[in-house]
Amino acid sequence: MCGIIGYIGPKAVAPILLEGLKRMEYRGYDSAGVALLNGTGLQTRRAAGKIANLEAALASQPITGVVGIGHTRWATHGPPTERNAHPHRSGDESVAVVHNGIIENANTLRSALVELGYEFRSDTDTEILAHLIEELFDGSLEEAVIAALTKVEGTYGLAVVSSRDPGKIVAARKGSPLLIGIGVGENFLASDPSAVLAHTRNVVYLNDGDVAVIERDAYRVIDRHAATIPHTVDRIQWDLAEIERGGYDHFMLKEIFEQPMSVENTMRGRLILADGTAKLGGINLTHADLMNIDNVVITACGTSWHSALIGEMMIEELCRIPVEVEYASEFRYKNPIVTDRTLCIVISQSGETADTLAAMREAKRRGAKTLGLVNVVGSTIAREDDGGVYLHAGPEIGVASTKAFTSQVVALALFTLKLARKRDLSVVRGREIAQAMHGLPAQLAEVLASAPAIEAIAEEFKESTNFLYLGRGYNFPAALEGALKLKEISYIHAEGYPAAEMKHGPIALIDDRMPVVFVAPHDAVFDKVVSNIQEVRARHGRTIVITSRDEPALKGLIDYEIRIPETEDMLMPILSAVPLQLLAYYIAVKRGANVDQPRNLAKSVTVE
Ligand code: AGP
């Protein structure tokens, strides 16, 4: 996802912009650039590839100024080249724009500008904005930006500077996050809190439709009529240290090892052991609302979709309410069965995934109540849902989601417990589940202690070209998640399957080169999994089995065993996730892959 940073103040601008862009590298990008205003006009520097290339360009040709904007681009229109890197300038070189999002009527606008004699120098949709603002400029930069945006269809988080109105940054937001960082004698703009955290904790999260005018000692939020609108100042909760790697080789490893604490934080103040229930202050659903739920839809993408599958089983098992899990990208375009008695649970670590946001908006349009399970405070989904449960997992920097997944499952368990105890779940059973949840942090620490053994297994399989992950019941989504972890960071093809389904095709893949990971803690269907393991062994498949107790039935069937503690079936994916994450991590590291920023991936997919 692209990153935006802006600064206006007394300090040297370029270093502040570069530092802010570096704080957002984890979001994924393939080019970067800055634009600065000084007394003589507008200057830009841009570079394809990593920010280090931009840094080199600035070192060889320094630029100074008192106002500046910067951008890291994740290509959507046009290849990742210097020519397509942001900022983009107007024809008269007086306006520079950085932009996250997609302009859907780009071709129409581009043709109209060409008709007016404008010459385009890039393949991007963003350049259109620069020319349009120049065309519409009549003394006020914010009024020109507002006028330009009335012609734009699509999504944007953008920042604009101009030598013709030099004392300000103008920003606008529609569908792509932006915030103002409030300093003393200086102000910031960013698409991500981490970019300004070193300077200020006080931020104003812009909403869709907001325009902001940011000056050195003042800022204002205005609407499409340039009228000032009220806004709230939030404080960023995270410390920069949380965002730094903290001594681990990679953010991903740090976040895997943070899970005892992140899971504890998700439950903090919410688990009511004595009553076997949960207290969730932000769901904004009354008792009557909860009792009125006819059906549940859970919509998400990627790893969040895997936790949704676990939530489906939890809610159906304990609340006896039908649940549908939908890929957000599918849900938003189908004709879903949603009524005012539907609860739509929206799961998203970033709170900015475009498909998930659109799916939530579609569910709301159809009358559903929406409940967001989101990690990033102040994110769009978190601010547009009807109510929510923040994961409180802390910033997840690694592109591969780890602690967010386990916290999502915990949050789903908390909600399920709360709802079930209003319906048919007894206090005795509720207490058992709550007690099991309470024990998770210690059990996670126990599982993490097996990291060296898992690294040794990774050594055995680092050259493999295919993996199969199998599980039943609650362990099937865990198998899917294990496969996704491996393929997205090691680039080894991996597939998750319900264990019994192996016979309906994938068994043809089994040979002595095929590692098969079984997520097989002891549960109600364990004996069935044993027969699946036998089928793999009979075809010389190599078995890596995650188990939870000594199992005589498995004697002679396991090549590599990973032992995890036992808990409620519905909570087992939280414990089995850790060896799956570590196996993927160590294999990827041994293959020299870029674990925190895998190729082609972004931390948050804010475009369709
Ligand atoms: C997970 O490891 C991936 N990075 C990806 O599948 C991710 O879960 C997906 O893009 C959804 O992101 P979200 O939770 O921020 O909406």
Image (spheres, rainbow, N blue to C red):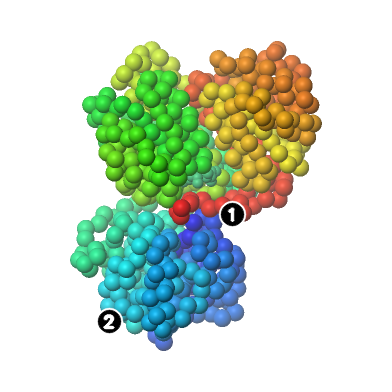
- Residue type highlighted by circle 2: Gly
Is the CB atom of the residue marked by disc 1 within 8 angstroms of ligand 1's nearest atom? no
Residue 559 in the image: x percent, y percent?
A: 75, 26
Q: In the rendered structure, find residue 600 and report the number of the disc placed on it.
A: 1
Compared to residue 9, the image places residue 496 above or below, namely: above
Query: Residue 139 shows which numbered tag?
Result: 2
Depicted 587 relative to depicted 453: above or below: below
Is label 2 in a helix, a strand or a loop? loop
Amino acid beneath label 1? Asn
Which residue shows up at 37% across the image and 37% down it? 336
Percent across and percent down for residue 505 are: 67, 29
10 Å neighbourhood of mark 1: few (<14), some, or many (≥20)?
Answer: few
Mark 2 vs 1: CB contact within 8 A: no
| Camera-nearest residue between 541 and 457 | 541
Q: Residue at x 71, y 50 (%)?
A: 592
Q: Earlier in the sequence, mark 2 or mark 1?
A: 2
Which residue is drawn at the image coordinates 75% and 28% (left, top)? 541
**What label does residue 91 carry, if any?**
none
Could you tell me how far apart the alpha carbons at marks 2 and 1 are, in whole angstroms?
A: 42 Å
In the image, residue 9 above or below residue 207:
below
Tell me: 182 left or right of 193.
Answer: left
Q: Mark 2 against mark 1, which lies toward the viewer?
A: 1
Query: Between residues 391 and 371, which one lies in front from this camera angle?
Result: 371
